[in-house]
Amino acid sequence: MHLKHLRALAALAATLPVSLAASASYDVDILPPASPMARQAYTLHWGIMYVCIAIFFIVFGAMFWSIFRHRKSLGAKAAQFHENTTIEIIWTIIPFVVLIGMALPATKTLLAMKDPSHADMTVKVTGYQWRWEYNYLNEGVDFFSNLATPRDQIDNYGGEGAPKNDHYLLEVDKPFVVPTGKKIRLLITGNDVIHGFYVPQLAVHQYAIPGFVKDAWFEIDKPGIYRGQCSQICGKEHAYMPIVVDARTPEQFAAWLQEEKATMPAPPAQPAAAAGAAAPAEMAAAQATGNAAAPAGGPAAKNAAPGAKMSLADLKAAGEKVYTANCAACHQANGEGLAGTFPPIATGKPFAAPAALTKPLADRGFYKDGHIVEGPAKEHMDIVLHGVPGSAMASWAHLTDEQLAGVITFERNSWGNHGGEVQPSEIAAARKAK
Amino acid sequence: MSTAAHAHDHPHGEAHEHHGPPHGITRWLYTTNHKDIGTMYLVFSGIMFFVGGTMAMLIRAELFEPGLQFFNPEFFNSLTTIHGLVMIFGAIMPAFVGLANWLVPMQVGAADMAFPRLNNWSFWLLIPASLLLVGGFFAPGGAIAAGWTLYPPLSVQQGMSMDMTILAIHMLGASSIMGSINIITTILNMRAPGMTLMKMPLFVWTWLITAYLLIAVMPVLAGAITMLLFDRHLGTSFFSAAGGGDPTMFMHVFWFFGHPEVYIMILPAFGIISMIIPAFARKPLFGYASMVYATASIAILSFIVWGHHMFTVGMPAAANLFFMYATILISVPTGVKIFNWISTMWRGSMTFETPMLFAVGFLCLFTIGGFSGLVLAIEPVDITLHNTYYVVAHFHYVLVSGAAFAIMAAVYFWLPKWTGRMYNETLGKWHFWLSMIGFNLAFFPMHFLGLAGMPRRIPDYALQFAEWNMWSSIGAWIFGATQLLFVYNVIHTVRSGRAAEQKPWEGADSLEWTHLPTPVPYHSFETAPVVK
């Protein structure tokens, strides 16, 4: 722990009363419900709270009366009564009856929550380490949704970081857009580990379990932005995979859907893309990092026909966005990785780690004498496409050829690397090779 | 039979010279004396309480404000994971076993535990196990960061510290099972003449039931983590859908262990409180028999409620309903216990020395933990609160102000008996009141954070959670620092406390108070007392 941190902490403690008065957020209730199920849960919560508060006053009332009155110091003589079957039966039966009173409405809500039938629309939601994918079934619209908060707002290791956005950590590059007033059924699954799809205001909370599809549903009353995040620990970036539901009127939603369809790539001509989900090509070039409500993409996002050559500058620019969204969490925005765990991308950087981690790198020509070196493009593509077994490096084959070519080119030409460009066609070839 | 072997070692009525303990390190390494082993368990759990507590302090430092200040997220996840495992398996469970070692033989009128050598082995297994558990921080890749629940596939992704943890849990489980066999045998076979089951002090009763729970569920956990180990290294697919397995199955097996485990950590606390409140109210426990039956009902129900940890897994509606009803049902026997304690206090002649303060603190805060448990039992409400800080608040109210407060009450209550010295009452009161303030400041705001939707196990959070987190951290640091007073008070008492009276608590009436001198000799009840 740096001295600087301690000082920052001390300074914070000193300004505590001021900062508390300045921007206090002392919410003590469940967030305002935005769906019928959430409203029922809200009512149930207050129902059980009233029961608890009533019991609280009875129990604590008796206890504190006794504590203040039946003290030896006040000359209280201990009564010696004990065992009274009548009273014991009464205090077993009464709570039992009260609880049945609570269980009945809860049963009704539970059954309604568990009934996703007669949905107007179905969206498949997949949790990845560490992002969400939304696939509008039957519409051909499918995209990933990443955290949009820049790293420099998150990392405050050196003391004060960049000022934080209003929706710090609960903002995404591309929100989950849905129509209001429609019953939307979610098919929820996980790609790698268990995630938790959790949007409190909609009373939707379902684990995303790899290999299994579970369902949930919601219906939103009013247009608006409803935020949530992954609720189940899923690794390092668990805190950084928010969910932003953007509810629009059915007309606005229809317009949005048309716009999205236009940006989606044609049904996969490349068989390899079927292995992963076909991610929108638009993501590579135009990832809006601003507030999630702004529709991302545009004409610039449409990339060239498959097979066309891209310039180094274009590849790099597109790749940087892919890197920020997908790679920077581990390899860091400056490409220097994290000591002992995540290797740097920048050439010449020292990297000390267990042999299990450095050996695959050395074998592929990326690691020599304790330092990271520039390796061959073929191996670079192989690592990104297939991951490194036994390490945290996963396969990124679900990204498009353009995205992968971009990010590899970006990595090979940043932070002192001069590895030249990699074209989308090379990625396509590499996919076929294995 | 053990009693026969025991009679051989120490023939009844025969005077012999070796009443004092041997000296040096071998006394502790080779000891088969229940008091020595009890002391070692308690010291060990105290150390682990501070190891786990230090991690909690670091967690609260990172959560003091939004953004990453001190740790990277992976290390933070390791801290929360190991904090949980250390507190459960290293601090609370060994503390209760230590108390059982000290008290069960004396309270049933036995000379020692039924299997003294097994007892020694149970304790010494804890040392390598805890080293493996905490040593994970120094393994390549760091300590496990999958949460104490070890859900696959995340736990399959972990580095070698996961294997160390699995081995550690196996050893801790073996230790618990052996300890439980010892306790059950001692209670069932070695009670003094006249000490019928329904005359046993409640601490003995609750431990008897707890020991059965341990024997029932520790092997289940062992099975789950063994399957995990096989999935990691031997290519099986118990928990991987790709090979025909199911990650959900791990959760079912884990929580089939996990829920009874919750009661393993609270039933002995019920026993302690059921002895301390009558002692300081100078009045018999209101409903002894109903307390025994309530404890047994809670234990039995604990086997059929595990699904309430899994309401968001996507079980069928019928399963969710069943687990909701069963969980709600548990509050009935728990309520019986609370009503019983209050009726015991009612029209008593109470004094409030430190053990009683902690017992009353337990009663107040455990009740609040019970309420939040009831809220969480309502499945549709749990949907919005599952895996949030509300749950963190709930289980700290039952485990810290429940189990840990009861352990502290027990230490203050029996320390004079064990050491023959009296603790410092003023310091004890300071310890209690500062603990109350720190604890509530740390954990009450977590209810609000959970209601507002802050998930647990995150190193960084959205800005609307900042204020309550700040207060929570301040409270946690007060609570943590206050525990140093406790350590000072205990060490000071043992080394130079004033001599305790023969019977420092007027209302205490179990065998160790009525039949044994203070401090208790190294060997007690070599001749069994006769209980009328």
Image: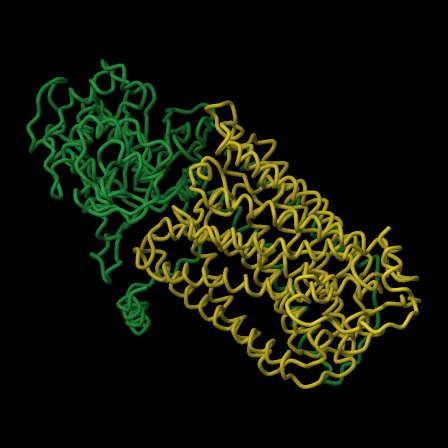
| Vertical comparison of A423 with B233: above or below | above
Q: Which chain is yellow?
A: B
Colour pattern: by chain
Left/right placement of residue A68 relative to residue B166 reads right
* Left or right of residue A93, residue B247 in this image: left
Q: Nearer the viewer, residue A114 or A429?
A: A429
Query: In front: A92, or A161?
Result: A161
Image quarter in which the C terminus of chain B is found: bottom right
Q: Quadrant of residue A221?
A: top left
Pinpoint residue B458: horizontal percent, then vertical percent: 39, 50
Residue in the image at 62% along x and 64% along y: A57
Tell me where residue A422 appears, x and y as whole percent: 13, 27
Q: Which chain is green?
A: A
Q: Is residue B69 visible?
A: yes
Comparing A45 with B254, the one in front is B254
Q: Look at 61% across and 41% down and name the residue there.
A: B221
Q: Residue B363, relative to residue A90: is it above or below?
A: below
User: How many dots with numbers?
Assistant: 0
Give how far across and how far down residue B409 sits, in percent.
Answer: 65, 70
Relative to residue B130, is residue B277 depicted above or below? below
Q: Residue at x 85, y 65 (%)?
A: B109
